[in-house]
Image (cartoon, helix red, strand yellow):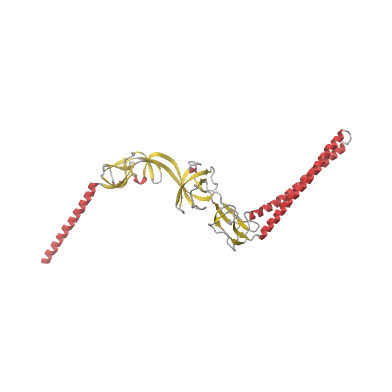
Amino acid sequence: MKKKLTAALLAMAMTVSLAACGAQEAAEQEEEEDGGVAVQVLEIASDTIFTEHTVVGKLSAENEEMIMVGSAAKCTAVYKNAGDTVEKGEKIATLDLGSTIANYNAAKIGYESAMQSLNDQKAIFEKQVKLAEDNVANTKALFEIGAASQLEVDQAELNYLSAKSGMNATLAQLESGIQSAKSGLEQLGLIMDNVDLSGNIIAPISGTLSTLNVSEGGFASTSLPVAVITGAEQMKITAAVSEALVLQIAQGDEAEVYVSSVDQTFTATIRSVDRSPNYQTQLYTVVLTVPAEVSGLVSGMSAQVTFHTDVSENTISIPTEAILTGADGQYVFVAEDGIAHRRIITTGLTGSGVTEVLTGLSVGEELVTVGQAYLVEGSAVRVVGGGK
């Protein structure tokens, strides 16, 4: 009996305790409700908004130079590494181009000799033609005074025409030989471009050796550049845009650029906009100039290029996430003297996380940006954050 009484008393005590806790929680909830819904607000102000279009572009140097060698020659020495700074005229590597150099020198001598022969033959023929021409004139003068016959005049003219025809035929043959020699020299010259007569690859400009595709003991490729040098001057960005965007941008416009590999953001200026699309991609090429003060960029880096179009100035723009949608359209809440008021709005341009509001809001009002989903017209609100 005592045990039953004790158990009953414990049960009553627990019931009273739970009731007290429940009452306390209800009181706290009621107090929170009496204080209003916790919200964050933002004071509405006028601003500039624009539509954004982002594309990916590539960075390159204004005066980037690629050194190609049209011979799979063996590399015998390397003097620089990728990333090194080089000066114009400095040696980068040495290739075994002994036979190529010999052929080039022979072709050069042959071409120069052919040119000299042409000039010598041309001078001789021109003298012969001039003599034949003078003979025609003299014979005609003698004919006028009866000292020469018509047959002699005809023979003089025939000799002149024969001399001129012989000159033209011989010079044409010599010039044909010269063109052949020149073609051979130019082909060898492509191999020797930026290579001296010792087989040394010479830097054509000063800058950074961004790429080096040869190593000592290896062979140079005929399809890849032996070296790529990025000049020390301004960089540029090349991007491709759609036909819809190309009509909205022009030379001189600015664009925001972000290079993620170096975590840099800067403003670039549009230098040129192609008005004809690429045949394969049907996209239009846009070239932008990187400001001279921007450093740390390397050719080949990717860049996010954001073009701003459809600019609207001195307009109200609010965070897009503050806008709600109902049966009657888009709306927001503003807080005034602790009360939430529902406002139907009309919107305009959309930008990066913001939307233009054309009607429904005024500058200086407090827009609810957090907690608006829990509000109705006339709800009590308690501002816990936000501001201007």
> Observer-nearest residue: 244 or 351?
351
Could you say which quadrant of the image residue 125 lies in? top right
- Which residue shows up at 77% across the image and 48% down it? 120
Do we see residue 173 in this rendering?
no
- Which residue shows up at 84% across the image and 36% down it? 140
- Which residue shows up at 10% across the image and 66% down it? 2
The x and y percentages for residue 227 are 57, 56
Do we see residue 171 in this rendering?
yes
Tell me if residue 367 comes above or below residue 76 in the rendering: above
- Left or right: residue 387 compared with residue 212: left
Q: For the image shown, how many numbered marks are present on the structure?
A: 0
The residue most toward the left is: 1
The residue most toward the right is: 147
- Left or right: residue 370 compared with residue 50: left
- Left or right: residue 23 compared with residue 154: left
Image quarter in which the C terminus is found: top left
Image quarter in which the N terminus is found: bottom left
- Which residue shows up at 12% across the image and 64% down it? 6
Tell me if residue 128 comes above or below residue 196 in the rendering: above
The x and y percentages for residue 73 are 62, 60
The residue most toward the top is: 145
The x and y percentages for residue 278 are 54, 46
Tell me if residue 283 comes above or below residue 83 in the rendering: above
Tell me if residue 68 comes above or below residue 155 in the rendering: below
The x and y percentages for residue 369 are 33, 46
